[in-house]
Image: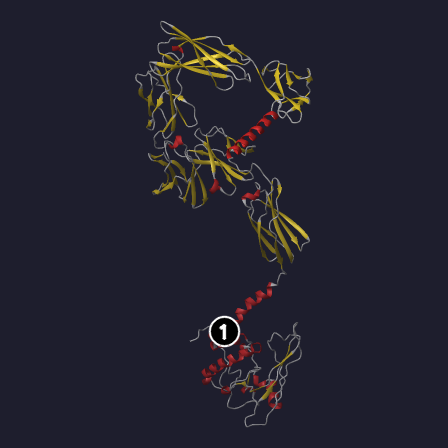
Amino acid sequence: MATMSRTWTIFTALAVLAVQICNGRKSCAIWSSAGSVVQRGSSFKVYCTFNNCKCQRSMYSDHPPKLQRHIELNSTTIYFRVANITKNRTYSCQCKCSPALDPCGLDFSAGYLPERPKNISCIYNVKDHERGVVFCTWNRGRDTFLRNNSDLWVKTVSKNRTDGPLLYKGSTKGTGLSSASFNVSSSVQLISVWVKVHNPLGSAVSITVNYTLSDIAMPSTPVLGQPGCSSRECIIKVEQSVRTQHLEIQYRAEASTWTSSPDSVVQTSLVQDRSISSLEPYTVYHFRARSKFSTGLWSQWSANMSSWTQEEAPAKELDVWYAAAASDFMRVYWKEPNISTARGRIIEYKVGVDSQKSGLVFLANVSADDRNYSFQFCADCEVKVWACNSKGPSPPARITTHHTKVKVQQLQPPQDVQVNTTDNHSVTISWRKHDTAPLRAVHVVEWYPEGHKLEELRWVRLGRNENRAVLTGIKPFECYEGAVHVFYNESSVSRTRFTGVATLTSAPAAGPSVQETVEGNHVRVTWTEIPRGQRGGCVTTYTIYLEIDSKQQQHFSIAASERMHIIKDLSPAGYSLWMTASTAEGEGRAGQKVNFFIQQETQLYPLVLCTVVTPIVLLLICLSHSSAVKQRFWVYFQCLMPDVVPDPANSKWAKECTQEGKMNLHLQLSNSSVTEEEDEPILVNVEELPKQSSDVCTPADVSSRLLPQTSLSPETEPATVLYPLTNYIKSFSHDSDSSDHTQTSLDTNTTVDYISSHGLGNMEEEEEEEEEEFAEMLGFFPSHNIFIEPMEFGGKLTLSAVKIDCSDFFLSEQ
């Protein structure tokens, strides 16, 4: 049962396969009148014959199929005429029925007949003394767009016989170039070669070329060993498979042309050492070699071998320059020497300073990565700089710290210095030289970004006959300055400066940073430079804009070299201030705005007066504490009094005092609040108390101390009351702008004495009492005058009793 099931499955599969094969059979046959390979530019016909096709028939070309307009030849055949074919094409035919049948098609290749091969060239590579290989190449002409087959035919001629022709299949190398090779023995002397090329359209044969093998013999390529070099010479080992008569060795430094060694000699062995001399120290050299028989061709160049020559001490001094940053500071610069000058790897630099008076000042070692060195300025000193490698130092480069003018022949500074910019970010500096310049005079042109001489100084040294320098590496939108120096025997003769050099310029991208300082009705404006990256080139002017209360506006143009400006005579108001910078391209953006205020100017005279008077008043107060000073002042005051002094006992006041007991006093106070226009006197009311035993008012015995608001200490009261106790009331009238009121002193009980009757024996006690009274009187300073206190003497004060000796005024206190 299982066997029958398996058999039925196989039968079903075969039936399905048969149906598919029947459905997939081709509906037609296709051919052409010229075959499937045709010549380009030719014309032919393509035919299609259909088998039992009752439906529509059609013809197509290329991919995707493109319908062509065919011609009916008969009931079963159609054709299409192809004219001037220029490329490979495909044609197909199809019968459109159901079920669909497979179409038929044919690929056509279009090409050319091969051309006759030409330019046959053969080389005989000698491997050893027994055999060699002949290698031939030829040009098979234009591309035929078809597959070509090349055959090399060779006939050899030995001493006594001729062999050939022998066939060697060629190979294609690139478009139109083919080659083939074959072995020959050393006995072969002549060869004859020709080439035949063919493709489906036809064939072509070259002419026959004859060669004498000795004329095309080429030795094998030499093999070089690793060179062994000193500072000036390299020894190279050369190996060859056969002995040759010529050996050429070439060498070159990096990025230079090849140079042939002049000492080429005949080879005497297969391995030999060759010397290459006249080389430069510390330089990498590349070497190659080739050889040749007495006749024939040169061999191929060997592979390059490279090696460094050894170092030597630098033979040339450095190119040095300097810059003085301040009177006590100097910086020397040098350029890195090239390989030919350094003659080795620079491991360090040395900077030394020698004084004409004291000899060596210092000697410093500087890293090989540095290109400058700073040191303390040394007058009349010579600076030396060396470059050092493993073999030693270079000759010293010298610079003097001062530059004196040549006395024998005075040189003028460079004239007519011209600055021209170019499109490639370089600047040309030219000047007119003088005919009187010494033969050994040199020019040095230095340049640097404005304000950055120490950081980015560059220079170029020129000869006497040169009057033009090209400055490279100029950054766009950067402002440069520099100078042209003339030197003779390391002494600076003169220089001419140039400024404002820029290759590209734009308006500044920012404004200066402003700081203002108000000084009365003036304002001091200071600012800092715009950052280098935002200047846009050389700044020509600064502009200060001043706005008054957001209404009126003024502007001030300032030179680019200034960093401060004072705006004077400003009226009291609020101000706004900002700045801009300008280049040759125009005005840049405004900087940050600042605001300030000018106040009303104050009167300085009262302030100065108080400042002067206050110390004087304080000094007088301090002097009033000394009784000796008061006594001497009173003596001096007595000297100034007139000779006739009236007796106080005969005064009207004294008589009224004794008769009525009530008096009116006109008191002139020194209070500043009382004006001279005040006519009303100050009245002092004195009330008489009951009579006592000693109520006699004698002017000679009364001491008048009219001290308002001050009461004496009980200890200082006299034993006998000369005047009755009174209520003393004083009224001050103040006439001022700020107040209009009356001050009234407190009622105080005081004892008023006119002239004290104490004797001279109590002078010391009274001086102490007076000091205590002075301290109490400071409580009401304006009403107290320390200079009208009378001197105290014993007895009654009469004119006969007063005798003044002014000679004692200036005596010092004992």
Q: Residue at x 48, y 12 (%)?
A: 119
SS category of the residue bearing label 1: helix
Residue 472 visible here: no
Q: List x then y, in percent, for residue 733.
A: 65, 78
Q: Is residue 25 above or below residue 477?
A: above
- Name the residue nearer the viewer: 610 or 285: 285
673 horizontally vs 629: left or right:
right
Residue pushed farthest top?
160
- Name the residue nearer the viewer: 436 or 511: 511
501 horizontally vs 273: left or right:
right
Q: List x then y, in percent, for residue 281.
A: 36, 29
Q: Is residue 134 above or below residue 98?
A: above
Q: Residue at x 62, y 58 (%)?
A: 597
- Report which quarter residue 217 is drawn in: top left
Residue 210 visible here: yes
- Which residue is identified by label 1? 622
Q: List x then y, in percent, for residue 78.
A: 67, 17
- Name the residue nearer the viewer: 736 or 533: 533
- Name the residue nearer the viewer: 748 or 251: 251
- Report which quarter residue 240 is drawn in: top left
Q: Residue at x 40, y 31 (%)?
A: 339
Q: Is residue 176 above or below residue 597?
A: above
Q: Amino acid at mark 1?
A: Cys
